[in-house]
Image: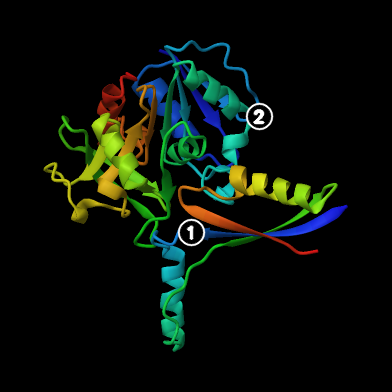
Amino acid sequence: MKFGVVVFPGSNCDRDMQDALQNDLNKEVIMLWHKDKDLSMFTTNDCIVLPGGFSFGDYLRCGAIARFSPMMQSVIEFANNGGKVLGVCNGFQILCESHLLPGVLLSNGQQKFACKNVFIKTDKSEPLKIPIAHGDGRFYADEKLLNQLEANNQILFRYCDEHGIVDEKNNPNGTVRNIAGIRNNNGNVFGMMPHPERATSSELNNIDGKKVFEILGLN
Amino acid sequence: MTYNVQIKVMPLKELLDPQGKAVMGGLKNLGIHSVEDVRVGKHVTLQIEAASETEAKQIADETAKKLLANAVMEFYEIEMIN
């Protein structure tokens, strides 16, 4: 599996993502500029990553302008053909704005930028320690959509404590139902606020991020 | 003809607006206690070249729907100025 990492003006986790994928997960990585649109070197077995950052300065709404970059038109087509797409942090916001994922990410409920290690888990996994760093990470969708996401197993990760307890105390941004990450109905587009690429090296004292890539089938 | 259009974009009423909440806190610190609620949105002005007011309004509506506002979290109102 090959990876493409899209660089937007204002992306700032693109090199972290490249480094984690290349050096910690031993993957081939091709960096992609947002103004290009050629994805012909990728097949649907490969994965395009939208990294974290502040694309276009977060002007208007986070991810709203990046959605119209030429490369995003190719990424949308790639995803619709079944190719894998992962959006982390700002990448998650771009996926929601692009309608590749449902819902939206609102500014944090507690009016603070949240930058710390948190725990997240799937329905089956142990709690994983992964860093977050965002001001707009409060996932929101209406009740009907949330019920639909739960019924289709589209909720990937929820915030929890170190023992795996999911509750309001361990919700860092006011997100509905403690949601930290979701996938689309087809299971090929993934979005999450926490940064797994910041936790894939033992030199950083945390390799839980590797387990996130495993859970997503991107290892 | 050029038409001047104003678009008001506001967070949906049922959603918590942290910006408004922060401004509310600032007002309290200022000693203004009579303000009961604050919500912060965006005010966008467009200059649109169109054949008629109806066409200008249509273009403004498309702009708001596709880019300026996200219906999951916001609503918008369009006002023609001239």
**Label 1 sits on residue:** B11
Label 1 resides on the chain identified as: B
**Label 2 sits on residue:** A35
Q: Is A95 left, or right, of A119 in this rendering?
A: right
Task: Say whether marks 2 and 1 touch (CB < 8 Å).
Answer: no
Both marks 2 and 1 on one chain: no
Q: Secondary structure at mark 1?
A: strand
Q: Is residue A66 above or below residue A84?
A: below
Viewport quadrant of the C terminus of chain A: top left
Q: Is A107 left, or right, of A41 in this rendering?
A: left
Viewport quadrant of the N terminus of chain A: top left
Q: Is residue A31 visible?
A: no
Q: Secondary structure at mark 2?
A: loop
Residue at 46% of width from left, 52% of height from top? Answer: B73
Q: Amino acid at mark 1?
A: Pro
| Picture quadrant of residue A179 | top left
| Picture quadrant of residue B8 | bottom right
Residue at 15% of width from left, 33% of height from top? Answer: A126
